[in-house]
Amino acid sequence: MKNKFPIPTLNNFDVFAYFEKAFSSVECEAIKSLFTDMDIGKVSGENSLDEKIRKSMVKFIERSEDTDWIFDKLTGFAFNCNIARWYFQLSGFYEGLQLTEYSEDGSHYDWHMDNGNGDLSIRKISLILLLDDPEDYDGGELGFLGVQEKKKYGKGTLIVFPSYVGHKVFPVTKGKRRTVVAWISGDPYR
């Protein structure tokens, strides 16, 4: 039986893996219909507003009958990527999915990591699913510490990386950049 979640062919020393067209255009549009009643994004772990660090709108969605398929598909990619690359002890989703919207008002998220103290300490793998075509917005590139290239990815691309890797979203200057951000958790590192 063929594995429906491909294993990345990138070098094991690469900071991240990405899967183009991991989600279809129809699936991306279905997810975008959930972008209602958004809240102001806060700085992870600090629960504070600081527009110098982060300016975005967010909404968390929990697993339900309507969203199971999103959680399941993300889990498949994350676990297969982990088997091929990192061998972290994983347990699954501890948090809901974060819908994030960056708009042309300079929305961005400066350099940060997705894990930290307290509840954030169990985040092991971060996932970012791009929901818009790169031609639909200007700016909004994703950058990783240690990687010189900042890049815009196509609609339906899924980026997978360890939650301790520093990354940022450059300011959006035109249009909207919408994503699903998710974290697969496991026991804290020892």
Image (cartoon, grey):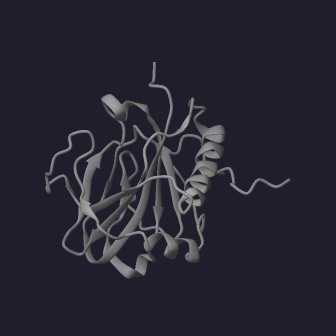
Judge left or right: residue 117 versus residue 73: left
Q: Residue furthest front?
A: 65
Q: Residue 30, percent across and down?
A: 51, 73
Please report the residue visible at 46 percent of the width from the left and 18 percent of the height from the top.
190
The answer to whether residue 71 of the structure is visible from this angle is yes
Q: How many marks?
A: 0
Q: Residue 131, percent across and down?
A: 46, 70
Judge left or right: residue 13 versus residue 60: right
Judge left or right: residue 7 versus residue 62: right
Please report the residue visible at 50 percent of the width from the left and 52 percent of the height from the top.
63
- 59 up-or-down from 87: above or below: below
Judge left or right: residue 28 versus residue 114: right
- 111 up-or-down from 100: above or below: above
Please report the residue visible at 45 percent of the width from the left and 50 percent of the height from the top.
182
Q: Residue furthest top?
A: 190
The answer to whether residue 15 of the structure is visible from this angle is no
Q: Residue 143, percent across and down?
A: 36, 56
When asked about the image quadrant of residue 70, the answer is bottom right
When asked about the image quadrant of residue 137, the answer is bottom left
Please report the residue visible at 25 percent of the width from the left and 66 percent of the height from the top.
171
Judging depth in this view, the residue of 79 and 18 nearest the camera is 79
